[in-house]
Image (tube, rainbow, N blue to C red):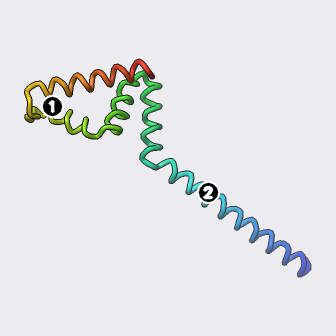
Amino acid sequence: MTSTDRRARIELLRARAQYERILLRRAACDALEGLRPDALASGASAGLRAAGMGWLAATVRTLRRYPMLLSLASSVVSGARVGHPYARLGVAALLVWRMLRAGRRG
């Protein structure tokens, strides 16, 4: 093997190593992208819909969109006073209405 062949081989190996590093970096970025909370939530939502539990996915989506509903719902479930006696009934009715509406859509 001549020195020119050896240099060419070394350059090819360096180029291949650089290409593999680029592929590894891209795969790592894709993996991190898939681990973002919104990506995980959308994957879980699609799985719930496929399993026939679209209403649960709709509930989670609604609670993520309106975080105050989660606080009110936990107050209703725990039995804490929410002010007016009809407040618990109103919160429960609102949650049921949102679940039914989302179930009809999806």
73 sits to left or right of 58: left
Across and down, in percent, residue 37 comes to 42, 47
The residue that mark 2 highlights is: 26
SS type, badge 1: helix
**Residues at marks 2 and 1 touching, judged by CB atoms closer than 8 Å:** no
Splitting the image into 4 quarters, where does residue 58 fall?
Answer: top left
Report the side of 36 relative to 60 (left or right).
right
Residue at x 84% of width, y 78% of height = 7
Indicate the quadrant where residue 89 lies: top left
Q: Please name the residue that numbered disc 1 is placed on.
A: 76
Q: Is residue 5 above or below residue 68?
A: below
74 displayed left or right of 20: left
For the residues marked 2 and 1, what is the alpha-carbon distance in whole angstroms?
47 Å
* Outermost residue, front side: 84
Q: Is residue 9 above or below residue 3?
A: above
Count of all numbered marks drawn on residues in the image = 2
Quadrant of the rendering where the N terminus is positioned = bottom right
Counting from the top left corner in percent of width and height, residue 61 is at 37, 34
Q: Is residue 44 above or below residue 50?
A: below
Q: At label 2, which amino acid type do we have?
A: Arg
Please tell me whether mark 2 or mark 1 is closer to you in this view. 1
Q: Residue at x 44, y 42 (%)?
A: 40
Q: In percent of the image, x 89 and y 75: which residue is there?
A: 5
Q: Given the image, on which type of amino acid does mark 1 rest? A: Val
Name the spot of residue 95 as percent of width and height, x first: 27, 26
Assign the C terminus to one quadrant of the image.
top left
